[in-house]
Amino acid sequence: MTVHDGLTKGWTRDQMAARAAQELEDGFYVNLGIGIPTLVANHVPKGMQVTLQSENGMLGIGPFPYDDEVDPDLINAGKQTISELPHSAYFGSEESFAMIRGGHINLAVLGAMEIAENGDIANWMIPGKLIKGMGGAMDLVAGVKKIIVVMEHCSKNGDPKFIPACTLPLTGKNVVDMIVTDLAVFQRPDRNSPFKLVELAPGVTAEEVAEKTTAHYIA
């Protein structure tokens, strides 16, 4: 269960990651995107065997290290320092993407700038910033069996991020299966169905979610 202090409305970034971690299953191979999704590594349920994969060439990622445990040679795709596990393996990017493109990754948890009501995702271009490229995101949304997006419900200027249609360049079409925001959780049983509001964060009402969402969904 996600721990909440009972005072703050909605989930913190760490609590959003913990909620997404509830979707993990024993034996899963999982890729974590940059930002909030990386925090999922700290919330793998005890006793569950989950293998985290990074597209820069690592299988078996441990929790973020403490300051005195940092190894500068161990980083994830977002250039954050990480820890290794006894069963960790290292390989080239070509093998990493072969795993992704070959459908061998069960779940990807990604961030996003926009999600459309039909499951389109835009998560590689930040308006007004110089971007080198979309990285592995396009391969992940095309090759991974299940896609969960973890993101703030609104942008920094207050605009909804779960919207009727994406305005930014797409990463993938009709690929998102579940959305976890600081306010709520949306899910759909298959990619031919609309999203449904399935859970509210503590202190948040369905009316507040509706006010901050322009996408159509089942309440």
Image (tube, rainbow, N blue to C red):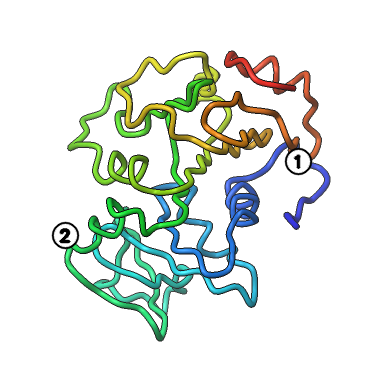
Which residue: 55% across, 25% down? 154
Per the model, the C-alpha gap separating discs 1 and 2 is 44 Å
- Please say if the residues under marks 1 and 2 sit with CB atoms less than 8 Å apart: no
Q: Residue 104 sits in which quadrant?
A: bottom left
x then y, percent, for residue 82: 38, 68
x then y, percent, for residue 162: 54, 23
Q: Which mark is residue 8?
A: 1
Against 65, is 185 above or below? above
Judging depth in this view, the residue of 94 and 110 nearest the camera is: 94
Which residue: 79% across, 51% down? 5
Q: Label 2 belongs to which residue?
A: 94
Which residue: 50% across, 22% down? 118
Against 54, is 190 above or below? above
Q: Is residue 170 left or right of residue 132?
A: right
Give the amino acid at mark 2: Glu
> Mark 1 falls on what kind of element?
loop
Q: Residue 166 sits in which quadrant?
A: top left
Which residue: 29% across, 60% down? 99
Q: How crowded is mark 1: few (under 14 residues within 10 Å), some or many (20 or more)?
A: few
x then y, percent, for residue 113: 42, 29
Q: In this view, does 75 lie to the left or right of 182?
A: left
Name the quadrant of the C terminus.
top right
Give the amino acid at mark 1: Thr
The disc, 1 or 2, on the residue closer to the chain's N-terminal end is 1
Looking at the rendered image, the disc whose residue lies closer to the viewer, 1 or 2, is 2
x then y, percent, for residue 83: 40, 74
Against 91, is 168 above or below? above
Judging depth in this view, the residue of 55 and 211 nearest the camera is: 55
Q: Is residue 106 left or right of residue 153?
A: left
